[in-house]
Amino acid sequence: MAIGSKELMPAELATMDDERLVVELKRAKEELFNLRFQSATGQLESHGRLRAVKRDIARLYTVIRERELGISASPAPVEKAADKKKSKKADEAPASDDQKAEDN
C-alpha cells in the first residue's frame, strides 16, 4: 500500500513540468509545517498524514534531482493552439516561395 497523496503518484509526477513540481514541493512543505505545529500543540488527529507528507516531499525532491542529472526527461512542452496556427502558416509560406522560384 502506497502512502502519500493521490495527486502525487509517480506516474503523475512524470507528467508535471519543473515549475509545477516546485509549486507542489512548496505546498507540501507548508502542509508539513502545519502538521508539525498541530502535533506540538496536541491538535493533530492523523499522525499518519505526517509520514505521508514527508514521503511526498522526498518523492518530489527525487523527481527534481533526476531531471537535473538527466536520468529522467522533462515532459515535452505542449504548444498552445495559437502557436500551432502560427507554425502552420510559417510552414506554408516558405513552401509557396519555393514553388514560385521553381515556376520562374
Image (cartoon, grey):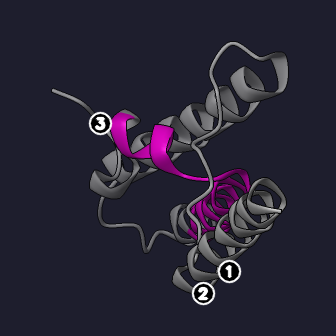
Please state the horizontal and vertical placement of residue 87, each as a whole percent of the image: 67, 70
Judge the density around disc 3: few (<14), some (14-19), many (≥20) Cα neighbours within 10 Å: some
Residue that mark 2 sits on: 82
Front residue (pair 14, 39): 14
The segment highlighted magenta reads 11-34
Q: Earlier in the sequence, mark 1 or mark 3?
A: 3
Outermost left residue:
1
Q: Give the labeled residue for mark 3.
A: 3
Residues at marks 1 and 3, CA–CA distance in whole angstroms: 45 Å
Residue 80 is left or right of residue 25, and the answer is left
| Front disc: 3 or 2 | 2
Q: Quadrant of residue 75?
A: top right
Q: Residue at x 73, y 28 (%)?
A: 67
Q: Amino acid at mark 3?
A: Ile
Quarter of the image where one finds residue 63: top right
Q: CA distance from mark 3 to mark 2?
A: 41 Å
Alpha carbons under labels 2 and 1: distance apart: 6 Å
**Label 1 sits on residue:** 86
Callout 2 amino acid:
Ala
Q: Are marks 2 and 1 in contact (CB under 8 Å)?
A: yes
Q: Nearer the viewer, mark 1 or mark 3?
A: 1
Quarter residue 60 falls in: top right
Q: Residue 2, position in %: x, y?
A: 24, 30
The earlier-in-sequence mark between 3 and 2 is 3
Query: What's the residue at 71%, 51% (across, down)?
Result: 18
- The answer to whether residue 85 is above or below residue 20 is below
